[in-house]
Amino acid sequence: MGCNIAIDGPAGAGKSTIAKRVAKELSFIYVDTGAMYRAVALYLQKKGIDGTDSQAVADHCQEAEVSIRYEDGEQLVILNGENVNACIRTEEVGNMASKTSANPAVRAHLLNLQRNLAEKNNVVMDGRDIGTIVLPDAQVKIFLTASVETRANRRYEEYLAKGEKADLEDIKKDIEIRDHQDMTREISPLRQAEDAVLVDSSNMNIEEVVAAILGIYRDKV
Ligand code: C5P
C-alpha cells in the first residue's frame, strides 16, 4: 500500500485546492474523487436520466467508464475515452452528482478505481467517504470544514475570478442542499472518521491550512 492521506469534508471547504498543494509538497499524487462522481453524473445527465430514479441510475451507471490520467501534475478525468475536465465543474453537474452519488451502484462502480490508485501510489485523496469507507487504513485522515458563509463566499469569488456570473444567495442555498444530501444519505454519508483530525478553515488562509496538514502528516508518519 502507498502512503495515503485522506481529506474529507463538505462542498466548498477548499479540499481540492488544499489536497493539490499538500500532494505537491510531498510529491504524492492528488486524487479528486468528486471529479469521478461528477463524470458519472455528466454521463447520466446527457442520457436524460432523472438523478433520483434509482433504478435508471443503477441500470446505466456502469456504461460510464471512468479513469484518470495525469498531465503536468493535473488530474484529467476520462469518461468513455474522452477528457471531460472542462465540463464537470458546473453547479448543475455538482447537483446531479450529489443525487447520483447516493446510489450504491454508482459508489460500487467507482470504489475499485479509487482503492487501486491508493494501493499503487502515495496519494492525497479527497472526497466525502475516503477516511470512513474507501481508505479506512489511511495513515493520515483530515476532516476539512468551514462555515456555510465562508464556503459560499469562496465559491462566489471563484466564479467571479473566472468571469462567470454568480449569485451568492443561490450558491449558499445549493451548498446547504448538497450538505444535507451528502450527510443524510444512507450509504457512505459525509461524516468525520473517528480517527480523523478536524481542521476548520473558516479563519485560515490556504498557506495556514496546508502547513497544518503537513504538520499532522509529519507527526504521524
Ligand atoms: O467534491 P465535489 O463537489 O466535486 O463532489 C461532487 C459530489 O460528489 C458531492 O456533492 C458528493 O455528493 C459526491 N461525492 C461523493 N463521494 C466522494 C466525493 C464526492 O459522494 N468521495
Image (spheres, helix red, strand yellow):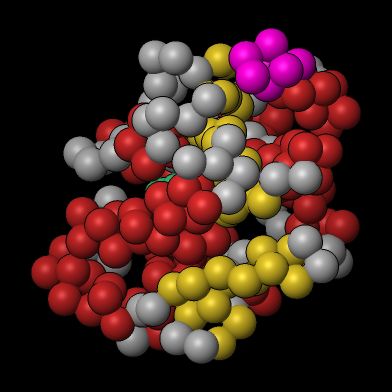
At which x and y percent is residue 139? 53, 25
- Left or right, 158 with reference to 170: right
Q: Nearer the viewer, residue 48 or 3?
A: 3
Give the vertical position of 58 relative to 65 (above or below): above
Q: Quick check: can you spot residue 57?
A: yes
At which x and y percent is residue 119? 47, 48
Residue at 55%, 87% in the rendered image: 82
- Left or right, 132 with reference to 39: left
Give the vertical position of 198 relative to 184 (above or below): above
Q: How many marks?
A: 0
Magenta residues (range)? 215-221
Q: Quick check: can you spot residue 33?
A: no
At which x and y percent is residue 87? 61, 76
Q: Nearer the viewer, residue 20 or 158?
A: 20
The question of residue 38 being in magenta is answered with no
* Quarter assignment of residue 70: bottom right
